[in-house]
Image (tube, helix red, strand yellow):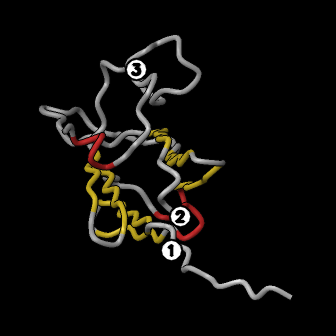
Amino acid sequence: MSTFEHLDLLVRNFFDSTAEFRSAFDSKIQYPVDIYETANGIVFEIAAVGADKEDITISTQGDTLRVTYNKEIARSGNYIKQSIAKRNFDLGWRLSSKFDLGKIEAKLEKGLLHLEIPYISKATPKTIEIK
């Protein structure tokens, strides 16, 4: 079973460049993101080097999670080597309905944006009284 199946992420159309939804970046461009499942839900860790929390937008619409950072990045000096990835990003994922996008917890710490999305609480069986 692949990681995406294990996480129950809906990745249909991910590699289809003509699909209605796909990653905001061209498939050749990679952005550092870790996605893993825990006992409580799913976790996204996104590299956000040099970003301030005020400049990051996290939004949801239906089953889609979008994380955006768009800020003019000033660079000065004559670089001898430039390896630190200080860049804007616009990322999006479609998630399974088993995750509760209304209860996302986010924190930005040491250049890493950490998003935790819990599972939807399972409905408890209910007995209906006949009147």
Q: Residue at x 43, y 14 (%)?
A: 16
Residue sticking out furthest to the front: 130
Query: Where does label 1 land, which residue?
Result: 121
- What's the CA distance linking mark 3 and mark 2? 28 Å
Amino acid, disc 2: Asp
Q: Residue at x 30, y 18 (%)?
A: 28
Which numbered disc flags the more N-terminal residue, 3 or 1?
3
Q: Nearer the viewer, residue 128 or 122?
A: 128
**Up-down: is 121 above or below 23?**
below
- What's the CA distance linking mark 2 and mark 1? 8 Å
Query: Where does label 2 land, which residue?
Result: 100
Amino acid, disc 3: Asp
Q: Residue at x 54, y 71 (%)?
A: 103
Query: Where does label 3 land, which residue?
Result: 26
Rendering coords of residue 19 (x, y %)? 53, 17
For the N terminus, the image quarter is top left
Residue 2 shown left or right of residue 108 in the figure: left
Instruction: Assess whether mark 1 and mark 2 are in contact (beta carbons under 8 angstroms).
Output: yes
Q: Nearer the viewer, residue 66 or 57?
A: 66
Could you tell me which secondary element the residue under label 3 belongs to? loop
**Up-down: is 1 above or below 27?**
below
Which numbered disc flags the more N-terminal residue, 3 or 2?
3
Residue 81 shown left or right of residue 18 in the figure: left
- What's the CA distance linking mark 3 and mark 1? 35 Å
Amino acid, disc 1: Ser
